[in-house]
Image: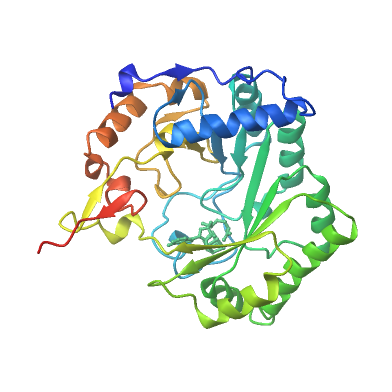
């Protein structure tokens, strides 16, 4: 597919008229957003503005989980996003078609002092889908109530043996059981208040295809209370080295059509896996998000992906997403 000739649309939310009886404007916008998302995922459509942004409120974290860049290769300076910069992202995005945000990339966003205000601001301004992934260590009772009322659409609890080991090493006087209690507490408060949102997800990791017995036990405990349990495969980090091209075909990655990452300092990257920002696509302190998304660098990277040459981009060379194992030679 040729990116230059690809259909582009302005995702202004007017594609679907509210003829569907009984549907609110918000329902219609959400339906349209999911339709655009499906087209972007299959790379049939490049919207003029990304449908989704990962907005990194901070790249700092209180844990050092063994599988994570925080424990190994992350050398990028630590910092937090200026709240005015956050508002600037939302203010530019929503009128141009931004529909969804995930409020983290490399760190633990519940350490951000204005986390609740950030969610409230984005919701008030019209972001349809606001997600947050957390290690749950900052989910105090007071925070549970504030998060439930904030307008957050999805809260993802990460739970892994790496989180447990790191937590118990860093907080030797506490047990990881207190974190499970934080999650249970959140779910109880939400239920007691009759709240449907945020939708909750328990996210766990498979190491070599296996779920650790500790994690299996926690799934059994929490599964009845969360909306969904998602198992993800452990991925390699960029500094672990590239994938073996004898074994894998690297297919184009949909991320470059769906979303981008605004790091805490305004630097734009394609994906959270580029944790040291080796491929900076632009800087929103000086450029608009729209300019970066439609700029030469993105165009060039999309072309590399579509011409099956993404191994030339270091951060994409070892990524298992959209990598297809080659058929074994007979
Ligand atoms: C980088 S963390 C940031 C958010 C938050 N600190 C947390 O742990 O949920 C986001 C997600 O990445 C996952 N993760 C970390 N290292 C990973 C790896 N090597 N492969 C796959 N997922 C990983 C974590 O388990 C977590 O669910
Ligand atoms: S809590 Fe999240 S960001 Fe922090 S070290 Fe663990 S996986 Fe990485």
In this view of the protein, which residue sits in the foreground, 35 or 245?
35
Q: Quadrant of the N terminus?
A: top left
Residue 303 x %, y %: 27, 29
Please indicate, yes or no, whether residue 107 appears anywhere in the rendered image: yes
Residue in view at x 61 percent, y 28 percent: 32
In the picture shown, does residue 284 fall above or below 146? above
In this view of the protein, which residue sits in the foreground, 78 or 111?
111
What is the count of numbered marks?
0
Q: Quadrant of residue 183?
A: bottom right
Residue 271 x %, y %: 43, 43
In the picture shown, does residue 172 fall above or below 69? below
Q: How is the image coloured?
A: rainbow
Residue in view at x 51 percent, y 52 percent: 106
Residue 48 x %, y %: 48, 20
In the picture shown, does residue 4 fall above or below 158? above
Residue lying at the far right in this picture: please name it. 193
Residue 5 x %, y %: 32, 17
Residue in view at x 72 percent, y 41 percent: 119
Residue in view at x 69 percent, y 82 percent: 173
Q: Is residue 257 left or right of residue 192?
A: left
Q: Is residue 27 left or right of residue 231?
A: right
Q: Quadrant of the C terminus?
A: bottom left
In this view of the protein, which residue sits in the foreground, 24 or 312?
24
Q: Is residue 103 left or right of residue 319?
A: right
Please indicate, yes or no, whether residue 287 appears anywhere in the rendered image: no
């Amino acid at each position: 597919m040729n990116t230059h000739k690809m259909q582009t649309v302005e995702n202004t939310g007017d594609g679907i008229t509210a003829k569907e009886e009984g549907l609110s404007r918000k329902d219609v916008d959400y339906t349209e957003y999911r339709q655009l998302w499906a087209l972007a995922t299959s790379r049939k459509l490049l919207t003029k503005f990304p449908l989704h942004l990962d907005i990194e409120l901070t790249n700092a974290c209180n844990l050092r989980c063994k599988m994570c860049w925080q424990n190994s290769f992350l050398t990028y300076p630590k910092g937090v996003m200026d709240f005015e910069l956050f508002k600037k992202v939302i203010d530019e995005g929503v009128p141009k078609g931004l529909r969804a945000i995930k409020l983290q990339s490399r760190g633990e966003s519940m350490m951000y002092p204005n986390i609740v205000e950030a969610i409230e601001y984005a919701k008030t301004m019209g972001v349809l889908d606001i997600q947050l992934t957390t290690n749950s260590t900052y989910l105090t009772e007071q925070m549970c109530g504030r998060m439930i009322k904030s307008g957050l659409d999805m809260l993802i609890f990460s739970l892994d043996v790496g989180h447990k080991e790191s937590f118990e090493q860093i907080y030797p006087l506490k047990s990881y059981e207190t974190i499970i209690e934080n999650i249970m507490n959140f779910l109880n408060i939400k239920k007691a208040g009759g709240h449907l949102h945020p939708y909750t997800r328990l996210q766990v990791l498979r190491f070599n295809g296996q779920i650790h017995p500790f994690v299996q036990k926690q799934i059994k405990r929490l599964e009845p209370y969360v909306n969904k349990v998602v198992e993800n495969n452990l991925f390699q980090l960029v500094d672990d080295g590239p994938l073996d091209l004898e074994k894998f075909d690297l297919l184009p990655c949909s991320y470059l059509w769906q979303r981008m990452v605004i790091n805490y300092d305004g630097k734009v990257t394609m994906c959270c896996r580029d944790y040291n920002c080796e491929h900076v696509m632009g800087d929103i302190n000086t450029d608009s998000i729209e300019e970066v998304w439609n700029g030469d660098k993105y165009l060039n990277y999309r072309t590399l992906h579509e011409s099956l040459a993404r191994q030339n981009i270091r951060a994409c060379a070892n990524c298992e997403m959209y990598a297809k194992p080659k058929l074994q030679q007979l």
